[in-house]
Image (cartoon, helix red, strand yellow):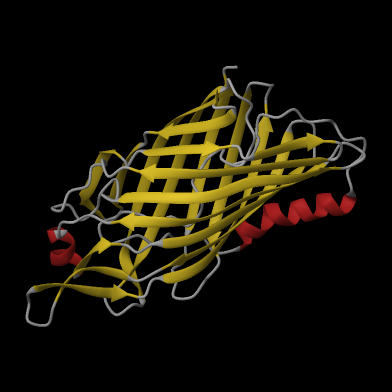
Amino acid sequence: MKNRLSNKNKPDGINRFLLLYCAVLLIFPFLLNPVNVFAGPDGSGNNFFYKGPMAFAYLSPGKFITEQAFDYQSFNSKFNDNGSVEHLSYNVVKYVYAPQLIGTFKLFGLDNYIEAIVPFGKVLMSTKFNHSRGGLDDPELYYGIYAYHYNENRFMVNLLPQLSVTFPYGNWNNSSLVNIGGDEWQFQPALTGIFGIRAADGQKIILNYALGYSINKGHPAVNDSAINDEGFSYTNPGDNFFTDAFLNYVILNKLDIYDEISYIKQYDNYGYFADSSGGISFGYINGGYQDFVEGLGLAYHYDKSLSFDARALKDMHGENAPDGGYGEFDAVYDFK
């Protein structure tokens, strides 16, 4: 998400207003009532924010990095077939462990970035434990080329176009009401990068950004269990336009704090649903949604090779959008 492995200069003094602002950011998400994340009727969660863990930062060629991420989601709402949000009478909880490998190399005179994620997890209904599924989640692969990098004087600029691909090889099954994985191909071209300014006393303010489009190819089979128990099943959850931004503050020698804001626009959804005659029909499900998400993150740099990162995100009520929340904790180790 950002350059969590860069060296930090210890500031000579910390602006009181900056400290107050950071304190507000820390408290604000916890003043809101905790709610749950939207998911499709098959238990696969939608993407409310950009997923590339280190896709904003410039990493010099020859790097080999591992990131061990632990994710948690919980949701109790869905879209019904007339396009409105419907709350479920139970929670669906998703736990994911996502080991990641990141490498950079020189090719044709350009700095290249590649990342592979092979996540594992479990999805279960908190009040219907007979509906659960675990195993492999959908793997992801990121590839990017550093188009521009500048790090002189007070300014840091990086431009990294990239493409990510999600593979439909998770443990999804049309006889299961909840699934680990969404059984869909996703192709996400994105323009990512950073713009940073160093202050005179050694503090830094860095804007990390991603702007892109997600092309989603949903599972081709009817989710029979979802139709029988919930009334309908998606087959294409709709393409997404998304933008994501982190405003990162270096406030101490080894500690960063950042505010994350995301916007996503999902387009029309189509799928199978139970019609008025009791049969199964394929057609228009709903018009999608648009949503804002805000969250807080902290990064601690133990030494030059090891850092820890944690963040929490909350849905901020967009148009026809459900309430949501998400958490992540990860450890990053740089072998070179």
> What x and y, as percent, mark residue 47?
43, 55
> What x and y, as percent, mark residue 148?
67, 40
> What x and y, as percent, mark residue 303?
69, 21
- Residue with the most extreme top position: 336
Q: Residue at x 64, y 26 (%)?
A: 60
Residue 179 vertical position relative to residue 88 in the rendered view, above or below: above
In this rendering, position of residue 197 left or right of residue 66: right
Picture quadrant where residue 82 is located:
bottom left
Q: Residue at x 63, y 61 (%)?
A: 31
In this rendering, position of residue 304 left or right of residue 182: right
Is residue 46 among what the camera can see? no
Picture quadrant where residue 261 is located:
bottom right
Is residue 69 among what the camera can see? yes
Nearer the observer, 269 or 310: 269
Residue 42 vertical position relative to residue 281 in the rendered view, above or below: above
- Residue with the most extreme bottom position: 276
Q: Residue at x 26, y 69 (%)?
A: 270
Nearer the observer, 318 or 6: 6
Q: Quadrant of the N terminus?
A: top right
> What x and y, as percent, mark residue 306?
62, 23
